[in-house]
Image: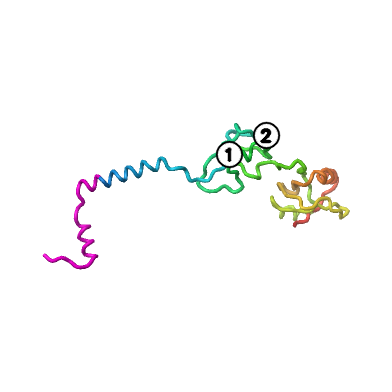
Amino acid sequence: MTLSSTRFDRVRALLRRRPSVAWRRFLALGLVLLAASTLFWPDVGHPAVVASRDLPAGAALSASDLRLVSFPGPVPGSFPGVDAVVGRTLSEATRAGVPLTDFDLASASSDLASVAVRVADQGLAGVVRMGDRVDVVSPSAEVLAENASVRETRGQVVVLTLPRLNATRVAALSLDHALAVTLR
């Protein structure tokens, strides 16, 4: 019997041998302990605030309405803590367990208001999207509001969030006339 001199042959010879019963039991015990230790590892998900029950639009949020849940991936626009959302108002109804994002909450500023505007150019109404910034222009070519945020679009009607001082004027003019908006 000759001993092989290469490392590959030595490893192959060791792998051919059957491990002892004690070694197999030791390995099985190690795997069981590793599996049991994973039960105590913290969840490494991404926290997001969700509604704890179905909530109507306009509801002022309290701590009992919210809970923190961990998601496998980040939720864009979500809040990492309940404290950031308590006291804010929902802009639209939400279901229990659905993550709350910055689009779901009404503006924190009291000097802003939302106004529905009928857009004169129906083709442009189809181009405007939520989150766009626009300027509002009257039929007499007077700029009524600058840098208004588009909150929602429905056909020829666009809901804009703009300073309260401009909102009443835009709302009054939009009752009688379709207004023009220019994209920024």
Any magenta on residue 55?
no
Q: What residue type is labelled 1?
A: Val
Q: Nearer the viewer, residue 44 or 144?
A: 44
Task: Identify the residue position indicated by label 2 in the image.
Answer: 60
Residue at image position (77%, 47%) is 162
Residue 174: percent from the left, percent from the top? 83, 46
Q: Is residue 140 left or right of residue 19?
A: right
At numbered mark 1, what does the secondary structure look like: helix, strand or loop? strand
Residue 20: percent from the left, percent from the top? 19, 49
- Of the residues under marks 2 and 1, which one precedes in the sequence? 1
At numbered mark 2, what does the secondary structure look like: helix, strand or loop? loop
Image label count: 2
The stretch in magenta equals 1-25
Q: In this view, does 45 lie to the left or right of 183?
A: left
Q: In this view, does 5 lie to the left or right of 104?
A: left
Residue 107: percent from the left, percent from the top? 71, 43
Q: How crowded is mark 2: few (under 14 residues within 10 Å), some or many (20 or more)?
A: some
Task: Identify the residue position indicated by label 1 in the image.
Answer: 50
Residue 158: percent from the left, percent from the top? 75, 48
Q: Which amino acid does label 2 sit on?
A: Ala
Q: Quadrant of residue 41?
A: top left
Q: Residue furthest bottom?
A: 5
Residue at image position (65%, 37%) is 93
Vertical placement of 184 versus 60: above or below? below
Q: Nearer the viewer, residue 171 or 62?
A: 62
Q: Is the magenta stretch mostly helix, strand or loop?
A: helix
Quadrant of the drawing holding the N terminus: bottom left
Q: How far apart in space, not on screen, are marks 2 and 1 (Cα)?
A: 14 Å
Asked if disc 2 and disc 1 are in contact, CB closer than 8 Å, the reply is no
